[in-house]
Image (spheres, rainbow, N blue to C red):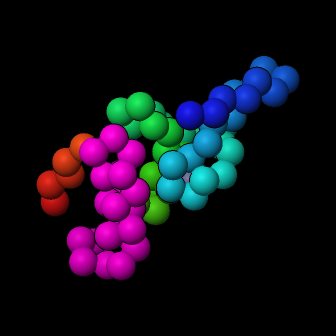
Amino acid sequence: MSAIQNSGEIKELCMICEEEKNEGIHLYTSFLCNDCEKQMLTLEPGEPLYQYFIEKLRKMKGIQIYS
Ligand SMILES: [Zn+2]
């Protein structure tokens, strides 16, 4: 994980969009930005993007996600 100190703001690399954001949540040991978190909440199981998110999450740490 990369964390960059930038004039008082800490930016972290989002595991989904792979952009550096300073607002988001920590999920296990990874970072999920606000935008991706919101997007994720609107997805329904079965949507291609949902699968993409789940795959990303799985690859992070080999954790199991049950839907
Ligand atoms: Zn993101």
Decide: is 62 above or below 17.
above
Residue for point 28% across, 72% down = 44
Quarter location, residue 50: bottom left
Rendered location of residue 29, percent (x, y): 41, 31
For the point 39% across and 62% down, the residue is 53
Q: Observer-nearest residue: 12 or 9?
A: 12
In the rendered image, the residue lying farthest to the top is: 8
Is residue 58 depicted above or below 25 in this figure?
below
Magenta span: predominant SS is helix
Range of magenta residues: 41-62
Compared across the picture, whether 67 is left or right of 1 comes to: left
- 21 to 55, vertically: above or below: above
| Residue 45 coordinates in the image, percent (x, y) | 24, 71
Quarter holding the C terminus?
A: bottom left
Q: Is residue 51 magenta?
A: yes
Q: Nearer the viewer, residue 15 or 36?
A: 15
Instruction: Judge from the rendering whether residue 7 lies leftward or rightward of residue 11; answer left or right.
Output: right
Does residue 54 belong to the magenta stretch? yes
